[in-house]
Image (tube, rainbow, N blue to C red):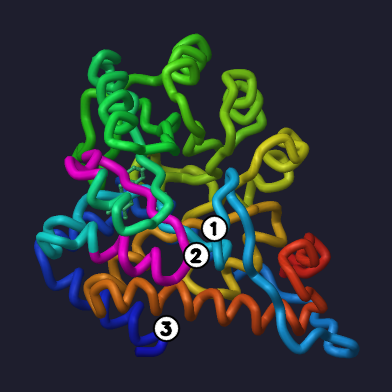
Amino acid sequence: MTLTELLTKGKQILEGKKIGFSIQAVETGWVWKNNRAVMEQYAFRQKAINAPAQADISCEFLGVPLKVPVVMSAMTMPIPAMADDGLLQVARGLKEAGSLMWTGTPIPKDIAALLETGVPLVVSAKPYAQREKLLAEIEQAQEQGAAMISLEVDAGQGTKIQDQPMATGCAPLSLEELKQIRGLVKGKLIMKGVLSAHDIELCLQAGADALVASNHGAHTIDYLPHPFQVAGELTQALAGRAPLVMDGGFRRGTDVLKGLALGADLVGLGRPILYALAAGGAEGVCDLVSQIGAELARTMTMLGAANLDGIGESCVMKL
Ligand SMILES: Cc1cc2nc3c(=O)[nH]c(=O)nc-3n(C[C@H](O)[C@H](O)[C@H](O)COP(=O)(O)O)c2cc1C
C-alpha cells in the first residue's frame, strides 16, 4: 500500500468502529484542525543545483540508534481494542522499520513481551493525583526492564475527547515532584507536553533527559498552539541542552522535514500508527514509517541536505 492508501484506508476503518471516537479531539476540535493547518503554512526552499543524490536519515536518540527520525507517539488505547496482539504488532512493525515504540495509558501489562521484540521502548506515565499510583507504575515498568520513562507533564487535568473526560484523577506536577520522579527513574526520563519556555526551563531544572513539544494530539486543553507556533520560544529556551521531539499532525515525510527544520530532533506519530495498524497490521506500521522516511530523504536532497545535520531553519519559508 502507498502512504496515502495506508492513511486513508486505516482512517476509514477506525472511523467505522466505536473505538474510532478515540481519534477525535477535545471540545471544539480547534487544536486538531490547527495542527494540520499549521503544517500547510510552510513551504520548502529548493536548492536543486549541486544537490546530493541521496540523503542519510539515520540518527540517535538518548544513545539509541534509529534508522529514521520518526517514532511512535505515546499511545496504548485503542491499540489492544483493535487487535488482541495489537501492541505486539506495533512493536514488530516499528522494530523492522528501525524506529522506537512509545506506550501511553494504560501502561501495558506485558512490557517484557514488547521489549523481547527488540524494539527500543519508552513507557509513559500519567500524573495521577494519587502520587503513590504514579510512582508505583514507574517502579513496575522499570522492574519489567523499561529503560526509558516519559512523564506527561501536560496531563495535569487529565484528558478529554469532545465533551467527555477520558483520563481522570490527574493533578498538575510541581517542580519538587518532577525532581522526586527524576530520582526514582534509573534510566532516561523524558518529559512530554511542553509548549513554553517556562516549562522547558523547569523540566531541565528537574533533570529531564529529553523533551516532547506536543499539544497531546488535541486530547488535553482546547486552544493549545501547535509546536511550530512556539518553536522559536522553545528552541531558544532549550539552547541545545536536550533533544527535542515534536508531535501533532505529522503525516508525511515532508511534514517531518518541516519539524526537523524548526528545531525537532525527532518527530512523533500518533494517529498514523493507528491507521497503519488498522490497514496493514505490523507490516502496515513498518511500511508507514519506512515510506515517511523515504519521502523525507527524497525531499531533503532537493533542499541540499545530505544528512539530518544539513537540515535547518533555512530549508523552510513561512507562507
Ligand atoms: C488514541 C490516542 C491515545 C493517546 N494516548 C496518549 C497517552 O496515553 N499519553 C500521551 O502522552 N499521549 C497520548 N496521545 C497523544 C499522542 O502521544 C500524541 O501526542 C498525538 O497523538 C500526536 O498527534 P497526532 O495524532 O496528530 O500524530 C494519544 C493520542 C491518541 C490519538
- Disc nearest the viewer among 2 and 3: 3
Callout 1: helix, strand or loop? strand
Seen at 42% across and 31% down, the residue is: 151
Seen at 40% across and 85% down, the residue is: 4
Q: What residue span does the magenta drawing correspond to?
A: 89-111
104 and 36: which one is in front?
104
Asked where in the image residue 128 lies, by quadrant, the reply is top left
Check disc 1: other Cα within 10 Å, few if <14, some if 14-19, many if 20+: many
Q: Is residue 96 shown in magenta?
A: yes
Q: Are marks 1 and 2 in contact (CB under 8 Å)?
A: yes
In the image: residue 268, left or right of residue 165: right
Q: Is mark 2 within 8 Å of ligand 1?
A: yes
Callout 2: helix, strand or loop? loop
Q: CA distance from mark 3 to mark 1?
A: 17 Å
Which residue does the numbered mark 2 point to in the structure image? 250
Q: Are marks 2 and 3 in contact (CB under 8 Å)?
A: no
